[in-house]
Image (tube, helix red, strand yellow):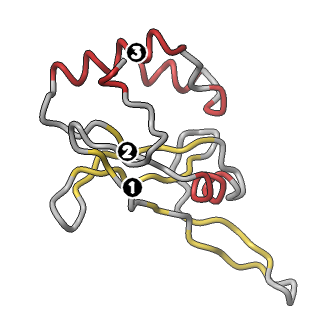
């Protein structure tokens, strides 16, 4: 059912603002159910903009992953309007020749362990 909804809805329109009250409730529910799990991941603006700037990119897909240290993380990639991962795209070089560039496959997300904070101004959901 969910996959059908994604296909019939434009990828670029997926997601909506849910507000602080519902967001807090959802985060607290997860933390109560998973008290030893990571509390948050941080993703910077620069890599988001770089991924979205790829030709044909209308969204970002996040895959659960385990990094080289054995820690939970995400690998994230750009997707096109058909929800296909952008693995490469066409480019024209300075000589006017057609070539390809590899799509961006990204990681290196700092994470927060329960009770810790990534930055001084991070919203501490567990204190709300």
Q: Which residue is mark 3?
A: 1
Image quadrant where one finds the N terminus: top left
Rounded to the nearest angstrom, the CA distance separating label 2 from label 3 is 28 Å
Rounded to the nearest angstrom, the CA distance separating label 1 from label 3 is 31 Å
* Label 2 or label 3, whichever comes before in sequence order: 3
Which residue is located at x 53 percent, y 64 percent?
104
* Label 1 or label 3, whichever comes before in sequence order: 3
Residue 4 point in image, percent of width and height: 48, 20
| Neighbourhood count class around disc 2 (C-alpha, 10 Å): few under 14, some 14–19, many 20 upward | some
In this picture, is 3 found above or below 78? above
So how many labels did they put on this image? 3
Marks 2,3: beta carbons within 8 A: no
Residue 6 point in image, percent of width and height: 52, 25
Marks 2,1: beta carbons within 8 A: yes
Kind of element beneath mark 3? loop
In this picture, is 27 found above or below 60? above
Residue 91 in the figure: left or right of residue 12: right
Which residue is located at x 57 percent, y 58 percent?
47
User: Quarter-wise, where is residue 58 in the image?
Assistant: top right
Residue 46 point in image, percent of width and height: 62, 58
Marks 1,3: beta carbons within 8 A: no
Which residue is located at x 70 percent, y 79 percent?
99
Q: Which residue is mark 2?
A: 41
Rounded to the nearest angstrom, the CA distance separating label 2 from label 1 is 6 Å
In this picture, is 116 found above or below 56? above
Which residue is located at x 58 percent, y 26 percent?
14
Q: Which residue is mark 1?
A: 109
Residue 44 in the figure: left or right of residue 93: left
Q: Residue furthest front?
A: 120
Q: Residue furthest left?
A: 36
User: Quarter-wise, where is residue 19 in the image?
Assistant: top right
């Amino acid at each position: 059912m969910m996959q059908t909804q994604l296909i019939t809805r434009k990828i670029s329109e997926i997601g909506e603002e849910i507000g602080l009250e519902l967001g807090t409730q959802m985060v607290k529910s997860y933390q109560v159910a998973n008290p030893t799990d990571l509390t948050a991941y941080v993703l910077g603006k620069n890599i988001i903009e770089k991924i979205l700037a790829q030709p044909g990119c209308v969204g970002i897909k996040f895959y659960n992953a385990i990094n080289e240290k054995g820690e939970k993380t995400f690998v994230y990639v750009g997707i096109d309007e058909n929800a296909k991962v952008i693995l490469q795209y066409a480019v024209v070089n300075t000589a006017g020749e057609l070539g390809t560039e590899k799509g961006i496959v990204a990681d290196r997300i700092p994470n927060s362990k329960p009770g810790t904070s990534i930055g001084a101004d991070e919203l501490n959901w567990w204190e709300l």
